[in-house]
Image (spheres, rainbow, N blue to C red):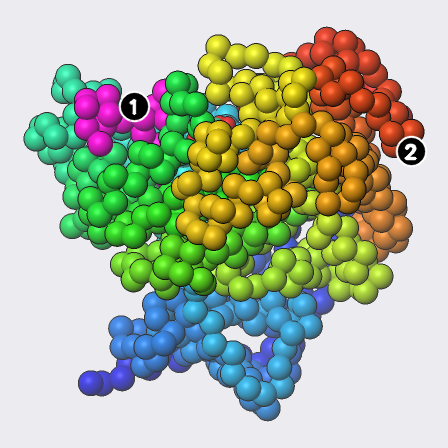
């Protein structure tokens, strides 16, 4: 076979342009993790081929003495271990060669090289080989056509549907570049609560414009679909998946989509969940629904990411429902369907055990869905670095096929062979100038991409990379900020839901505490979950209770079932315990809760001090923005503690220990406080309860 070797560039560079730094005072965070890369020339290549983009990145940003050569083996896999998107970087004395089987592999290799330069990880010799953990590294946007973003806290949608397809904003390409730099290759543009209009010819033309802009960056578009679309968009009276006319409608729609966007990735589907239509409306199963769609897009190479986020108002334990509904269907899904499972069995709580469904389906491809946007973690007001939480899930052993069947191993297709592997993250991106609403929340977008590329990377390593590329490599900044961010997730768990108490959030946007709230649906009211009463607190999911523990493979089932062996950080997730239950520390459960909250409060206060101590390293604008939000976070930590503990105190009748911060408001005051925000807003910092620090 003839080798087609395409040497794109051999460039020796000394780039004056990239030496220049943005003046500190004007930095607004829009540059993301390309902070020090401000070029005189526009960053984006005029000739939009993948290779020209890679070359341009090198021209603009590579400052090393060695020449950089990009070698792509188009259409002729010289190095099968690199696969479609992998690459190697060979460091030599006078030359660095990036090799890949595809141009996008070269682009990823280029971004890797620049990242190494920015973070001080260049080698003088040797070879680095990188292959992504998952085939599909997917962002899920919960963006609506009316520009609101469900659970989005960074302004309105990035996609300006009314202006498209005519007007093109520079952010579309900046977004694609940012994603390429961290290896994200699929993006679902619209909300899982999908408006059927997204599949109309009019919207597909708009989607096409985005797909065309994203393509050279290796980023493919997908859409969420509304299962009732045939009924909404045609004369059909039904959307029954077993009705041949309905199946034909989807086939025609798929053909139409692929004629407009030939590399369309596929569909994400929320069906029969929270009021969304689905196959069960017609007495059919999830498999019937998923397979009908999957068959329609299979000829074009598309995939269906069918979500397992299902629960009924009548369920005595919502945490069990996904396994109950999907396990009986194991083996029935067609091979281009992947079941998309939230990390935990309930709903993106700050700490959940992993969803037992990961360890149950043996003949069905599964993928994890993480939430990057901070729906339950203080929106874009709180600083919470989420990689440790995601990693906790991916590293969890499900014991599906014995020890070592971690969620990562299963979803990467290492336990059962998978045809397709994927991971999804619900984004925190909006049209805010700094993309994510909080300067430090950009770390979560970055971390999701890096994790989707390599699930073994540690939280510290990813954070170290991000800090250096976003702010500075100065040790005096990197060390304390890294320490602060590494502690932030655990701190949020402590001040929001210590020891496994869950869903005690206010209904208004899930911001702030609301343990007393009631709702028309029992499973939408906090009491369903925390079960605080005179006899104690916590959800009994043991074999004497809802028996949810049974969905975990041994030894987990026994471990969670037994109060002695259940990890204390999840003890109230699995057990209902008396207020004076003796914890391992020797304290009563009540005191332990008080002290854990206190730690959360103290840590949040400490974040303010840490940030103040690094002021001299940060531009004034970003410093100020973060400082103001950290103060709010510390106040909110006290608010959360006050509300939950004063509410629980009605039942425990025990005092808050004297060496803990004493409540600043009464329970009545806090209950009367009504936050007026919708699902689409972040509360204004000064609209929240008054607190002294
Ligand atoms: C919940 C959100 C809701 C989403 C739902 C989902 O509160 O807005 O629509 O998840 O994932 O966390 O479908």
The residue most toward the bottom is 93
- Image quadrant holding the N terminus, namely bottom left
Question: From which residue to which does the magenta span run?
Answer: 268-285
Position of 182 with respect to 40 (left or right) is left
Residue at horizontal 56%, vertical 43%?
562
Where residue 684 sits, quadrant-wise, is top right
Residue pointed to by mark 2:
659
Marks 2/1: CA distance?
53 Å
Residue 525 on image: x %, y % = 54, 18
Q: Residues within 10 Å of mark 2 (few under 14, many from 20)?
A: few
Residue 643 can be seen, yes or no: no
**Is most of the magenta stretch helix, strand or loop?**
loop
Foreground label between 2 and 1: 2
Residue 659 placement, left or right of 203: right
- Residue 40 versus residue 336 in the image, above or below: below
Tags 2 and 1 touching, CB below 8 Å: no
Q: Nearer the viewer, residue 5 or 83?
A: 83
Q: Which residue is mark 1?
A: 277
Badge 1, how many Cα within 10 Å: few under 14, some, many 20+? Answer: some
Q: Position of residue 633 (x, y in %)?
A: 76, 34
Badge 2 marks a residue whose secondary structure is loop
């Amino acid at each position: 076979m003839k080798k087609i070797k395409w040497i794109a560039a051999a460039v020796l560079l000394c780039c004056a342009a990239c030496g220049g730094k943005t003046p500190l005072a004007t930095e607004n965070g829009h540059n993301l993790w390309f902070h020090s890369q401000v070029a005189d020339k526009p960053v984006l290549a005029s000739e939009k081929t993948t290779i020209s983009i890679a070359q341009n990145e090198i021209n603009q940003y590579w400052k090393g003495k060695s020449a950089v050569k990009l070698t792509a083996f188009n259409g002729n896999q010289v190095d099968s271990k690199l696969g479609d998107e992998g690459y190697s970087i060979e460091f030599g004395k006078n030359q660095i060669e990036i090799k890949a089987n595809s141009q996008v592999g070269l682009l990823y290799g280029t971004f890797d090289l620049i990242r190494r330069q920015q973070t001080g990880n260049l080698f003088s010799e040797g070879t680095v080989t990188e292959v992504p953990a998952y085939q599909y590294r997917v962002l899920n946007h919960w963006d609506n056509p009316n520009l609101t973003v469900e659970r989005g806290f960074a302004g309105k949608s990035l996609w300006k549907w009314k202006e498209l397809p005519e007007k093109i904003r520079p952010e579309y390409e900046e977004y694609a570049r940012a994603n390429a730099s961290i290896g994200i290759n699929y993006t679902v543009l619209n909300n899982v609560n999908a408006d059927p209009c997204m599949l109309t010819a009019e919207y597909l033309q708009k989607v096409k414009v985005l797909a065309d802009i994203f393509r050279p960056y290796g980023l493919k578009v997908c859409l969420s679909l509304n299962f009732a679309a045939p009924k909404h968009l045609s004369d059909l009276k039904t959307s029954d998946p077993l009705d041949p006319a309905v199946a034909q409608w989807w086939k025609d729609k798929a053909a139409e989509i692929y004629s407009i966007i030939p590399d369309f990735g596929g569909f994400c589907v929320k069906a029969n969940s929270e009021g969304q239509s689905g196959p069960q409306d017609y007495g059919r199963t999830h498999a019937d629904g998923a397979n009908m769609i999957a068959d329609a897009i299979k000829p074009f190479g598309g995939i269906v990411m069918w979500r397992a986020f299902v629960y009924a108002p009548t369920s005595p334990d919502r945490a069990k429902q996904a396994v109950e509904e999907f396990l009986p269907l194991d083996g029935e899904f067609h091979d281009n369907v992947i079941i998309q499972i939230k990390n935990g069995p309930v709903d993106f709580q700050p700490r959940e055990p992993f969803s037992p469904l990961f360890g149950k389906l043996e003949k069905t491809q599964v993928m994890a869905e993480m939430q990057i946007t901070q729906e339950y973690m203080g929106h874009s007001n709180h600083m919470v670095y989420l990689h440790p939480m995601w990693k906790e899930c991916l590293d969890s052993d499900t014991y599906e096929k014995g020890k070592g069947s971690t969620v990562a191993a299963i979803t990467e297709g290492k336990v059962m062979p998978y045809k397709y592997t994927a991971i999804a993250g619900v984004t925190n991106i909006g049209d805010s100038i700094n993309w994510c609403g909080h300067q430090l929340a950009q770390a979560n977008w970055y971390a999701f991409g890096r994790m989707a590329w390599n699930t073994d990377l540690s939280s510290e390593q990813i954070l170290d990379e991000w800090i250096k590329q976003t702010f500075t490599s100065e040790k005096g900044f990197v060390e304390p900020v890294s320490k602060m961010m590494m502690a932030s997730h655990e701190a949020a768990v402590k001040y929001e839901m210590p020891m496994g108490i869950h869903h005690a959030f206010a209904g208004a946007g899930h911001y702030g505490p609301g343990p007393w709230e009631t709702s028309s649906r029992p499973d939408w009211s906090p009491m369903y979950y925390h079960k605080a009463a005179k006899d104690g607190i916590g959800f009994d999911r043991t074999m004497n209770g809802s028996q949810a523990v049974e969905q975990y493979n041994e030894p987990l089932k026994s471990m969670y079932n037994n109060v002695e062996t259940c990890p204390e950080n999840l003890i109230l997730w699995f057990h209902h315990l008396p207020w004076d239950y003796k914890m391992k520390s020797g304290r009563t459960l009540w005191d332990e809760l008080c002290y854990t909250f206190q730690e959360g409060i103290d840590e949040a206060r400490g974040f303010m001090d840490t940030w103040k101590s690094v002021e001299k390293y940060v531009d004034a604008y970003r410093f100020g923005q973060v400082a103001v939000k950290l103060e709010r976070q510390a106040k909110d930590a006290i608010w959360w503690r006050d509300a939950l503990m004063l509410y629980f105190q009605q039942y425990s009748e025990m005092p808050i220990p004297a060496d803990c911060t004493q409540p600043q408001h009464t329970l009545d005051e806090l209950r009367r406080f009504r936050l007026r925000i919708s699902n689409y807003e972040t509360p204004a910092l000064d609209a929240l309860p008054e607190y002294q620090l």
